[in-house]
Amino acid sequence: RKYLDCYNNVPHVGHCNPRVVQAICDQAATLNTHTRYLHDGIIDYVERLTATFEDPLNTAIMTCTGSEANDIALRMAEGMTGKRGIIATDATYHGNTTLVSQLSRSNVPEVGFGLDNYFRHVEAPDSYRIDDPDGQRFAARVQEAVDDLEASGIGFATLIVCPLFLNEGFPMQAEGWLKPTAEVVRKAGGLLICDEVQSGFGRSGSHFWAHQKQGVIPDIVVMGKPMGNGHPVAGLVTTDEILSKFRNSFRYFNTFGGNPVSCAAAMAVLEEIEAQQLQGNAAKIGKLAHERMSDLATKYDVIGDVRQAGMVFGCEYVLDRDTKEPAVDYADRIVNAMRHEGIILSKLGRHKNTLKIRPPMPFDEGNLDLLITTLDKVMAATPVHA
């Protein structure tokens, strides 16, 4: 049975991409070991990867998962500041190590070895319900959390965010929206960590990295899932100063991080993005998707808001456009009905009522037409109240 994948950002350049498959096979047939045995592949890849960033982001650590990379990033913040206070939003997810899992508000751990004392969660941005066009309100909330951490004696070390706030429901934001928050973080002596596991590698359409759209230069950028098109490779990019401090403060080794096969897969992904002009495709299809979704909103009152950021788009379902009451059950039924029609997507956001569409980057106009036509059919057949 055929399915149209409208959600999976892991096969970033397409399922079973020939360039990536061949790179993995060729390297696996030549040599694969860990990074105690030096190989040119990791140097070549990191040089090409860091060339997509602004100075002083010029060096990297390779890992196997985004969780590992975020864990390292948080330790880097402790090493640089000598403090342990960490701020995230109240509707986020960044991974599942013991430390990183404390960031999550969607998969809240029942126990956490007392680490919850070190975390503060601020109100997630919500362009549909909260008026904050220039990011000043969010920055003020971050400042309050910074002040609380400092007053507690824990101290403020870092703010970690996805620049597009994808788990929070990808609210619409003007370019530079995150600038006021970055200024709060820097003034307080903390580090800004941008988790680009979902938003990076051209998905925002306008920029290769979403923080560039926001007009900020983070201290650390974390990446994962799409980095190897399904092969388990992840990592982070940072500055020489931060990496040097980390190396001198923590003893760290990752057996499989940056192994030759992983680096070959990751390099092939960068090559494919460039060769197939996938960043441009994300901008083009994202714009068309917003138009098509907006057309549906004129037909169905249950669509309260349409949002899009490059190759991430969707809508928020509400029971009433005036009260904006979340239509959570309806969103569930739409997702499952679409699955029965062979269309895979999901929902998320702080109210779990936002349809999230985040397809592989080669997603084209024909795919989009099938998606919208099927969604129209399913919504017409699905009553708002079960």
Image (cartoon, helix red, strand yellow):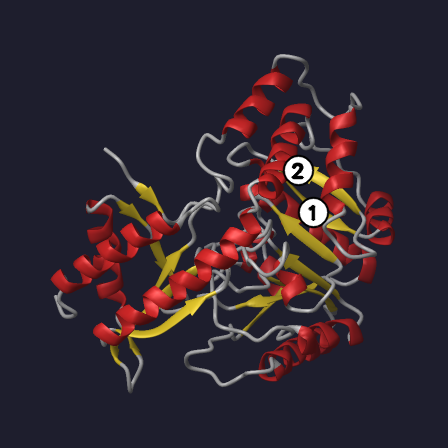
Residue 60 in view (yes/no): yes
The disc labelled 2 sits on which kind of residue?
A: Thr
Q: Residue 89 carries which label?
A: none
* Disc 2: CA contacts within 10 A as few (<14), some (14-19) or many (>=20): many
Question: What numbered label is drawn on residue 236?
Answer: 1
SS at circle 1: strand
Measure the alpha-carbon separation of dots 2 and 1: 8 Å
**Residue 9 place in picture, x, y as percent:** 47, 46
Q: Position of residue 194 (x, y in %)?
A: 65, 59
Q: What residue type is labelled 1?
A: Leu
Report which residue position mark 2 lands on. 63
Q: Quadrant of residue 218?
A: bottom right
Residue at point 61%, 17% (across, down): 26
For image coordinates 62% across by 59% down, the residue present is 207
On the image, the x and y values in percent for residue 189 come to 80, 70
The residue drawn where x is 66% and y is 37% is 63
